[in-house]
Amino acid sequence: MPELRFDPVQLRWVIISTERGRRPSQFHQKTEHTKTSFCPFCAGNEETTPPEIYAVRENGSHVNGPGWKVRVVANKFPALQIEGEMDRQAEGMYDKMNGVGAHEVIIETPDHDKQLHELEFDHLVDIFKTYRFRLTDLMKDNRLRYVLIFKNHGVRAGASLAHPHTQIIATPITPKTVAIEFDSARAHYNVKERCLFCDMIRAEIDDGRRIVYDNDGYVGFAPFAARFPFETWIMPKKHSHDYSLSDDESIANFAKAVKDILARLNVSLSNPPYNFVLHTGPNVNAQPRRPNHWGTIEHDFHWHLEIIPRLTRVAGFEWGSGFYINPVQPEEAARFLREINPDAKYEPEE
Amino acid sequence: MPELRFDPVQLRWVIISTERGRRPSQFHQKTEHTKTSFCPFCAGNEETTPPEIYAVRENGSHVNGPGWKVRVVANKFPALQIEGEMDRQAEGMYDKMNGVGAHEVIIETPDHDKQLHELEFDHLVDIFKTYRFRLTDLMKDNRLRYVLIFKNHGVRAGASLAHPHTQIIATPITPKTVAIEFDSARAHYNVKERCLFCDMIRAEIDDGRRIVYDNDGYVGFAPFAARFPFETWIMPKKHSHDYSLSDDESIANFAKAVKDILARLNVSLSNPPYNFVLHTGPNVNAQPRRPNHWGTIEHDFHWHLEIIPRLTRVAGFEWGSGFYINPVQPEEAARFLREINPDAKYEPEE
């Protein structure tokens, strides 16, 4: 069973996951995906993954067989485990609990070599509806306080398999980064009775210098205090704290925005490694809950997607300080991305 | 002039440093240090660095010439700039200030190919006395709230030059990570009238499972909630909140501990990339200061060194959540490091 341990200095939980453990000699890093003949996520290899949780499939195709377009399975090497009690307890002066939670993989396409932004528009819509379905489903489990959906693309962004996929980790505690956002959003709302993110969207559209993309429902921009070069946030223009409440029209507009922005990053930065993370609201169904714990969360918070190309390395300064050095002005990065033709194709040099 | 910008969502400052800027096409990452014939940190090339701020030198040798053992210069591509006013101001709904601060490099040895732990013991003592000297000196500048001393070893840990060096970045704001530590330490002291770190040291020595190294003055251990495999913290056994107040005997014991632990990591993990960060107290001389801002800091806080081997990659989960998955039990990591012979030499395979 993985274990959650609390750091009393940084006030942060850590997952000690020996299920994923390696011997010290096994930590040598690779820098490229090795080209192997076998990929567990490719069509035809369905039996090598844990059983299917959900799939978008052709009519008549069979569960755990081929014929799928998007497929969700449990992670074979889960960081957290779905069965069991949390069993919060002290260990001497420290605190720990069992590593209860969910760890799933959304295989975005049967095609090993197609990147997310290269898929057909309808296919992206299916993927983002799958996000909604899994969020809704996992939020029924009242042990889980937060459902985190994220994607690692490229070895340098932490992807261990090249085949396009998204991951879901649902945790029995509210992650620290998320908790800080809920708190800052709440503080803003308490003073102004306006959503912090709605204020940002209006300010960004009025200013214009940091805008990368704009459609009826969504805006993509370089944040004023971007941590990383070409960091881009995508936000729904209509206030909503919870991605899982998005309707089909909203998801279609979201898919357009993501496809366009990922294509711009791909062309302009030569297929960069990247991470993206969906920042959505908490699981308000989680128990036990302190009275008024989530308060006005549906007014305070505003879901969004943060995309981080991984171009610079995080070093001692960032680890020690928690602040970041960004060598590219957000206004410059946005202008560069705006001016790129997203339909151009990045051609790797051989 | 670099700019400091505040992220209203994560409540975090970011340095936008276009001095260090590169064109988008210049972000391709290298994975090894390129072997070039020229290194600005090597003996004989003193004139290619900014002028010397301080050096440990042979008698009779000349400033900015050879004959030094440890040498401190300003960073040629500084993230922050020492001249100028802070000029805090709003920009629309956002907040910014000038990037005032210091960015220095401590060149640890004239020898390009010697790693820190391979230097003679007396040489390490000179380096760590240099840390003390620069800390003391920079803390006289009352614009600077914090002086961060850190080291990046290896390209994957963010070192841009292979020649052994430490960096110093002094900032006009208290970095977030540090502020959290001061707060958690204060909260502990307020309740118990005991130092959080003194409590940890006693608990670790009593327990023993996570101890890596122990001498008269210092203890090195794997923290209970280590974020990374083989993460090791070194703490002075005698309570002290500020590294710059260490006496010569304490620095000698510190040098012994660092040399031993880095040698253990080097042998057992095959010369891993690593970062270390000195967590010392704030600059209590900084102005303006709110009444009682640092309160009982000299009782609350306890300086220490955090060493992080960079064996795993930080991916979407960590960026999105601020919590970490560690695949190695801290007790296992400590046992492994304890059992290694630090005098064995890591021989790279050719």
Image: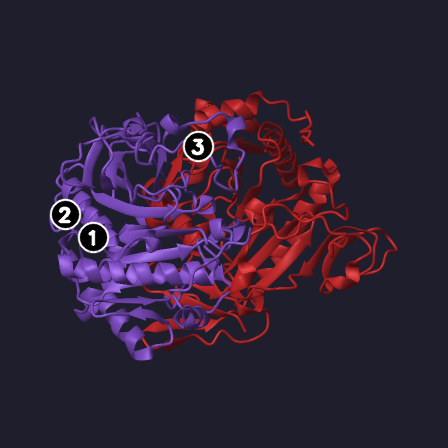
Chain colours: A purple, B red
Callout 2: 10 Å neighbours few (<14), some, many (20+)?
some
In percent of width and height, residue B129 lies at: 67, 48
| Residue at numbered disc 3 | A37
The dot on residue A281 is: 1
- Which of pointers 3 and 1 lies earlier in the amino acid sequence? 3
- Which of pointers 3 and 2 lies earlier in the amino acid sequence? 3
Q: In the depicted view, which residue is nearer to us: A168 or B270?
A: A168
Q: Chain of mark 3?
A: A
Q: A142 left or right of A14?
A: left
* Residue occupying image coordinates x 39% and y 71%: A338
Q: Chain of mark 1?
A: A
In percent of width and height, residue B155 lies at: 59, 47
Answer yes or no: are tags 3 and 2 on the same subunit.
yes
Q: In the depicted view, which residue is nearer to us: A308 or B147?
A: A308
Residue type at the position of mark 2: Val
Q: Is residue A344 above or below residue B183?
A: below
Q: At numbered mark 2, what does the secondary structure look like: helix, strand or loop?
A: loop
In percent of width and height, residue A179 lies at: 27, 51
Q: At numbered mark 3, what does the secondary structure look like: helix, strand or loop?
A: loop
* Residue occupying image coordinates x 26% and y 62%: A256
Q: Are marks 3 and 1 in contact (CB under 8 Å)?
A: no
Q: CA distance from mark 3 to mark 1?
A: 40 Å
Give the farthest residue toward the top.
B339
- Point out the image quarter for the N terminus of chain A: top left
Residue type at the position of mark 1: Gly
Give the farthest residue toward the front.
A60
| Residue at numbered disc 2 | A284
Q: Are marks 1 and 2 in contact (CB under 8 Å)?
A: yes
In percent of width and height, residue B64 lies at: 79, 61
The dot on residue A206 is: none
